[in-house]
Amino acid sequence: MTPVIILAAGEKSAEVTNWAGRVGWVVGLGLFVAFVYWLMRQGWKWRGSLQSGLPELPTAPETAGEARLTLSGRYHGSTTAGHWLDRIVAHGLGTRSRVELTLTDAGIEVVRPGANDFFVPAEALREARLDKGIAGKVLAEGGLLIVTWAHGDQLLDSGFRSDRAAEHAAWVEAINSMNHTRTTEGTAR
């Protein structure tokens, strides 16, 4: 037998990428991502309009007194007290940022670069505790300093994390002792 040689039917080049189809998919995916981002932004704005009944944030008084404690770290947001997933976004309270806290006899001054600063008056302070989470941030047990305070007719929990977590215990003790002093004097609500 003689070997049979099969010749190719003709020269054929390798398949070329379908650039029009690929560009179409990339553009479609980009539009989908933009649409999802727009929906998220609309949800954030909607939540802010639902919370528009919150009064403006208080500002620090001219004479706040001598600093009892200071803390440098991160502000992780505020929620309705007792509901760690119900984020408050009105007046910029939902914006995460760096933070400088100063505790004085007048209250807590919250300075946030790139976000709204605010002041928590001493009479508005209810308690402080260590916890593991607040909306959008979950850490190990005791990793967050949670300060509960009254704003208007609503109680809020604000979450902070110090650059040095060992400072949290001193803040809890100081805030709770301020609250206890006011309660025993009959000035707490």
Image: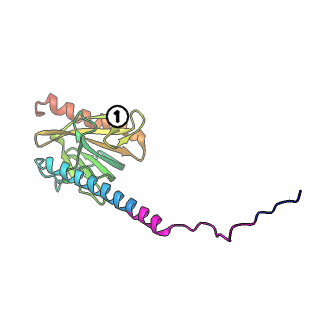
10 Å crowding of disc 1: few (<14), some (14-19), many (20+): some
Find out whether residue 151 is within the magenta segment: no
Q: Position of residue 160 (x, y in %)?
A: 33, 44
Give residue 36's quadrant in the image.
Answer: bottom left
| Residue at point 28%, 38% (across, down) | 85
Q: In this view, does 9 lie above or below 184?
A: below
Find out whether residue 21 is within the magenta segment: yes
Image quadrant in which the N terminus is located: bottom right
Q: Where is residue 120 in the image (x, y as percent from the top left)?
A: 20, 46
Three-letter code, disc 1: Asp
Residue 51 seen from this side: no
Of the pair 131 and 13, the residue shown nearer to us: 13
| Residue at point 37%, 35% (across, down) | 132
Q: What stretch is highlighted in magenta?
A: 7-27
Image quadrant in which the C terminus is located: top left
| Residue at point 10%, 40% (across, down) | 153
Residue that numbered label 1 is attached to: 131
Give residue 87's quadrant in the image.
Answer: top left
Of the pair 40 and 151, the residue shown nearer to us: 40
Of the pair 34 and 96, the residue shown nearer to us: 34
Residue 186 seen from this side: yes
Return the residue found at the far top: 184
- Tell me: 65 left or right of 186: right
Q: How many labels does the image show?
A: 1
